[in-house]
Amino acid sequence: MWGKSFVSCGHVVVLVDDAEASFAFYRDVLGLDVVASDRPHPPQRPDEPPAPTPGLGVWLMAPSSPHEAALVGRQAGHRPLLVMLTEDLIRLRRHLVARGVDVWAERRDADGHSLHFSDPQGNVIVASQPR
């Protein structure tokens, strides 16, 4: 066995057909670092939100083939594309709902508390607060 060779995940690639909406969602709503995007020019506004916290980055890519285009919004089928951990799921839920994100499948069990929501493309994301 090779052992643990990786210390973290640098970024995840998300296929998008609406770079503007996806950029705003991942950066402004989730606070993730959008490491690359097919978005033409980032906004340079004085009221721009603060820079995202370091960690997982999202690489937004336009599909480059009909096969990839068919995967937009369902890269993982009907399963979660991302499972993200948080220290305060209740606060996160309020934050998401206040920004118009549809939250469903909220669960509490012996392992913790979780909820499901979707990105603008329809990919399922799970947020979890472990016990």
Image (cartoon, rainbow, N blue to C red):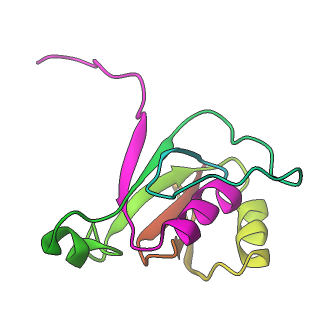
**Residue 67 appearing in the image:** yes
For the point 73% across and 53% down, which residue is it?
88
- Say which quarter of the image contains residue 9: top left
Q: Is residue 10 above or below residue 38?
A: above
Magenta stretch contains residue 4: yes
Give whichever of 13, 47 is nearer the camera.
47
| Residue at x 30%, y 77% (from the top left corner) | 78
Region of the chain picked out in magenta, as a range: 1-30
Q: Is residue 97 above or below residue 58?
A: below
The quarter holding residue 66 reads: bottom left
Q: Nearer the viewer, residue 46 or 96?
A: 46
> Could you say which quadrant of the image residue 71 lies in?
bottom left
Q: Is residue 111 above or below residue 73?
A: above
> What percent of the width, then of the height, locates residue 98?
79, 76
- Report x, y in % for residue 114: 56, 64
- In reply to whether residue 13 is colored magenta, the answer given is yes
Q: Is residue 108 left or right of residue 94?
A: left
Look at the image and tell me in which quarter the N terminus lies: top left
Decide which of 30, 112 is in the foreground and name it: 30
